[in-house]
Amino acid sequence: MEQNASYLPILIQAAIAIGFVGLVLVLTHVLGPRRNTKKKVENFECGIESEGNARFPVSVKYFLTAILFVLIDVEVIFFYPYAVNFREMGVQGFLAVVMFVAFFLVGFIYIWKKGALEWEK
């Protein structure tokens, strides 16, 4: 019971913060002005006037590049704990990292063979 009491200030602070946010959201919706003019509901992007339709097809290559970037970032993030604790992890940790890299390498070779990295076609 004594250990649970130490969380009480955190729970009170979280309840007050959530209550304040909820109260402000409700009050701004109820008390705020409602002026929906044509100029106000128009799209705005950095002061540049909108031209044409924004719904044009984008090459899948851009999305593949973004996904590859995220995968490489995640791989690097998982390398950090190994780099810090590689002595304590021993051979078992080394084999786990080798297997982790092998999975990524197989996926990379697969997308390479499928031509996902070739931009000029």
Image (cartoon, rainbow, N blue to C red):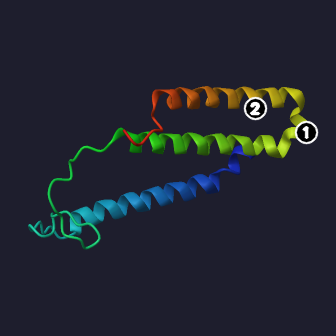
The image shows residue 110 at horizontal and vertical percentages of 53, 26
Instruction: Left or right? Give the position of 7 relative to 12.
Output: right
Label 2, label 1: how far apart the Cα atoms are: 13 Å
Specify few, some or many for label 1: CA neighbours under 10 Å numbering under 14, 14-19, or 20 or more: few
Q: Look at the image and tell me in which quarter the C terminus lies.
A: top left
What's under tag 2, amino acid-wise? Val
The image shows residue 18 at horizontal and vertical percentages of 46, 56
User: Residue beneath label 1, please?
Assistant: 87
Q: Which mark is residue 58?
A: none
Identify the secondary structure beneath mark 1.
Answer: helix
Identify the secondary structure beneath mark 2.
Answer: helix
Residue 1 in sight from this viewpoint: no
In which image quadrant can residue 101 be found?
A: top right
Q: Nearer the viewer, residue 17 or 67?
A: 67
The image shows residue 91 at horizontal and vertical percentages of 88, 28
In which image quadrant can residue 30 be found?
A: bottom left
Task: Name the residue at 69% across, 49% down.
Answer: 5
Seen as rendered, the residue at the extreme left is 38
User: Residue beneath label 2, please?
Assistant: 97
Q: Is residue 56 above or below residue 18?
A: above
Q: Nearer the viewer, residue 114 or 7?
A: 114
Q: Nearer the viewer, residue 97 or 58?
A: 58
What's under tag 1, amino acid-wise? Arg
Seen as rendered, the residue at the extreme front is 121
